[in-house]
């Protein structure tokens, strides 16, 4: 086994056997995300069940026939409590103490207004005892019931008006004379899917992808920094430097070992995350039912290959940066605090690009963001989704140049005595004044 | 017998601090040479320069005729260096650690196995070599590290404070290991310590270093006689005029 292979093998063995790395980088994403997804699914199902079994109350101040028809309609197929009260205030007190989630209030004059061709007022009160989603949604369900009634009542009025005036026509067409439908044109193809549906898909992806990139790079940075700092803390690096092996071989070996574990971590993260999305959003079939590849926005094999390359150069640059910084530290704790600053240029583009497109930002902010290499990783993930390979190639180029510069700096640091003598303590760099003991 | 180490007017500064102010000494082949002095005297800096970890500001240091700056790679092949308070990879077991280190020196399977076997024998850790290093006591770790340093049969072994932080019993065992190996193999060793009694027990010749300067050099007996002292500790105090 050559020196390089020996170092890589040792590095992987050490990282995999470290329970913190094994659990935090490889096992946690596999366990945590499916559990989170399951948790969301369970809570959503509970909300749905709660909405289905929701009880409504009804209080009518109007004794007219038209109001009674609305009351009967709401009572059909629903669990409804009719509140008997002397006033609305009294009715609201009773409603508040009941187990109903929504009160439909029909004020006096509703029937008369409808009869005279005016709008009849109906008001819905939500009983927000626990301020949860189920309570709010149940009020919406009560509102929908009234809206459905409103629609059919309107159709019957149109029908009787048509009959009275001896005119022909469809009550549905008169109610909604325009039938509006949407389609989208993507890369020259007309897709019978509304733009809002497609953009909601893109938005969901563009939120997910930057988070994934950010997490993966943070894992890698922390792992590499810890690995170097541990070697310095235990003085194994000092021993390694006196062995008949090139310092660049040591650097390359450590980088490769960390890249292997970071890739394993990313794979486990992606598996965990896909379980999370499939279980967390299973209650909303409309989100996942649109066939993205049919819309021309799926990732093609070429996109996957380029994306893999982007991820690889991103990881190498982040690891080289972390190692370059960690050599100035003398303990794991100081390495983690120093490399913590690297998380800032990751979080800023991730947060901005989650909610906005780069072209929508002011020119100056665009340039600042584009100067950060990790912005390009996030742009490349979105570009892969849309098949814009030129953007990915540009990203690979930029990150590669940055990586070469960082690797050159790391190699320089490794080939000097700075790796032994410099250290970072309490936010200041200083050289060891006392070398002897 | 030739010269194993030759140091001439060695100087090293860290910023404005001058750690070595013109150090001179020589170590003969097959000799155990002790570099003794208090904390901050310049022992570790001297050993790190010989170990090719840091470069001198000026002066010259040679190991078996190889300049430590110009010919660092050749020095690394024939030298074994054990830093003070060094550790081993905690998630490897003792055997894996020895094998990993031997891999840098042995390029054939037979040579590698011989080296690892030598490491097993020197360490005396037996079945405990199958345990992970993070389960070892301080003394066991030091025995493993010394075995690592010696198993490759280096032409020069540098041991920086080999018994630092060990209790009396562990230090006794480690000193025994070093003495026994040196006697059997006739190797050259450069040992630093601030424990002057330890150096007196281990070394053929010693150099007293203080504030970056060698203040006395010779066999322990010669130094004790020169300062009319009963041990090296007393001789050191006399030499620095602190006594």
Image (cartoon, coloured by chain):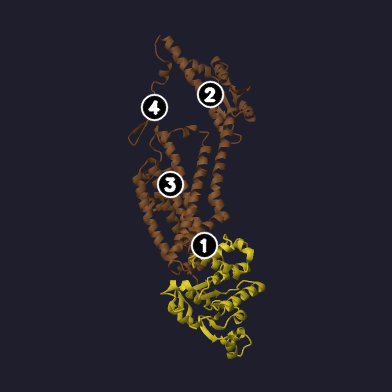
Tag 2 secondary structure: helix
Chain drawn yellow in the picture: B
Chain of the residue under label 2: A
Query: Do the residues marked 2 and 3 share a common chain?
Result: yes
The residue identified by callout 2 is A145
A177 or A294: nearer the eye? Answer: A294
Q: CA distance from mark 4 to mark 1?
A: 61 Å
Front disc: 1 or 2: 1
Q: CA distance from mark 4 to mark 2?
A: 25 Å
Q: Earlier in the sequence, mark 4 or mark 2?
A: 2
B172 displayed left or right of A283: right
Chain of the residue under label 3: A
Front disc: 3 or 4: 4
Query: Do the residues marked 4 and 1 share a common chain?
Result: yes
The residue identified by callout 3 is A352
Q: Residue at x 53, y 75 (%)?
A: B158
Disc number placed over residue A79 in the picture, else none: none
State the image coordinates of residue A127 (x, y, percent, origin top left).
Answer: 59, 31
Query: Do the residues marked 3 and 4 share a common chain?
Result: yes
The residue identified by callout 4 is A181
Tag 4 secondary structure: loop
Q: How many numbered discs sit on the rendered protein?
A: 4
């Amino acid at each position: 086994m050559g020196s390089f292979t020996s170092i890589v093998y040792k590095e992987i063995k050490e990282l995999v056997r470290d329970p913190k790395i094994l659990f935090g980088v490889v096992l946690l994403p596999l366990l945590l995300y499916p559990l989170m997804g399951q948790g969301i699914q369970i809570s959503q199902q509970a909300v749905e069940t709660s909405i289905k079994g929701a009880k409504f109350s009804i209080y009518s101040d109007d004794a007219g026939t038209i109001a009674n028809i609305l009351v009967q309609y709401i009572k059909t197929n629903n669990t409804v409590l009719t509140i008997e009260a002397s006033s609305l205030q009294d009715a609201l007190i009773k409603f508040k103490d009941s187990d109903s989630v929504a009160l439909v209030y029909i004020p006096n004059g509703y029937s008369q207004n409808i009869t005279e061709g005016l709008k009849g007022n109906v008001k819905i009160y939500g009983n927000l005892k626990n301020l949860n989603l189920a309570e709010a949604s149940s009020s919406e369900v009560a509102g929908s019931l009234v809206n459905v009634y409103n629609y059919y009542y309107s159709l019957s009025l149109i029908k009787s008006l048509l009959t009275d005036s001896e005119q022909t026509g469809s009550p549905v067409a008169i109610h909604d004379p325009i039938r509006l439908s949407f389609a989208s044109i993507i890369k020259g193809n007309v897709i019978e899917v509304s733009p809002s549906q497609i953009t909601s898909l893109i938005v969901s992806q563009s939120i997910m992808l930057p988070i994934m990139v950010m997490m993966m790079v943070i894992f890698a940075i922390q792992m590499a920094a810890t690995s170097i700092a541990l070697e310095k803390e235990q003085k194994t690096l000092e021993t390694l430097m006196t062995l008949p092996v090139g310092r660049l071989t040591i650097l390359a070996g450590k980088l490769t070992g960390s890249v292997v574990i970071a890739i394993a971590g990313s794979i486990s993260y992606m598996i965990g995350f896909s379980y999370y999305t499939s279980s967390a959003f299973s209650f909303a079939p409309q989100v996942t039912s649109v066939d993205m590849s049919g819309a021309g926005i799926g990732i093609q094999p070429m996109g996957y290959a380029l994306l893999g390359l982007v991820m690889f150069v991103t990881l190498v640059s982040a690891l080289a940066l972390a190692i370059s910084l960690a050599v100035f530290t003398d303990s794991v704790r100081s390495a983690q605090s120093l490399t913590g600053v690297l998380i800032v240029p990751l979080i800023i583009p991730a947060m901005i690009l989650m909610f906005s497109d780069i072209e929508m930002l002011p020119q100056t902010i665009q340039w600042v963001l584009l100067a950060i290499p990790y912005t390009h990783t996030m742009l490349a993930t979105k570009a892969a989704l849309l098949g814009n390979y030129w953007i990915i190639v540009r990203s690979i180029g930029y990150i590669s140049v940055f990586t070469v510069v960082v690797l050159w700096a790391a190699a320089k640091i490794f080939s000097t005595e700075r790796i032994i003598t410099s250290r970072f303590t309490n936010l200041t760099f200083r050289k060891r004044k006392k070398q002897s003991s | 017998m030739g010269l194993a180490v030759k140091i001439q007017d060695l100087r090293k500064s860290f910023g404005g601090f001058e750690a070595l102010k013109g150090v001179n000494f020589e170590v003969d082949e097959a000799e155990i040479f002790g570099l003794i002095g208090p904390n901050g005297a310049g022992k570790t800096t001297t050993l790190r320069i010989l170990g090719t970890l840091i470069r001198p500001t000026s002066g010259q240091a040679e190991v078996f005729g190889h300049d430590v700056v110009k010919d660092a790679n050749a020095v690394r092949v024939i030298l074994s260096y054990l830093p003070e308070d060094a550790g081993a990879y905690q998630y490897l077991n003792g055997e894996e650690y020895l094998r990993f280190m031997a891999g840098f020196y042995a390029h054939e399977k037979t040579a590698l196995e011989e080296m690892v076997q030598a490491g097993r024998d020197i360490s005396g850790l037996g079945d405990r070599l199958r345990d992970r290093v993070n389960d070892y006591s301080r003394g066991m770790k030091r025995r493993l590290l010394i075995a690592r340093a010696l198993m490759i049969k280096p032409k020069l072994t540098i041991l920086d404070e080999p018994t630092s932080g060990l209790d009396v019993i562990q230090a006794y065992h480690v000193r025994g290991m070093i003495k026994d190996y040196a006697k059997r193999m006739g190797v050259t060793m450069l040992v630093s310590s601030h424990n002057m009694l330890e150096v007196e027990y281990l070394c053929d010749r010693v150099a007293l270093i203080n504030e970056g300067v060698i203040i006395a050099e010779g066999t322990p007996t010669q130094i004790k006689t020169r300062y009319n002292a009963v041990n090296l500790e007393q001789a050191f105090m006399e030499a620095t005029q602190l006594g």
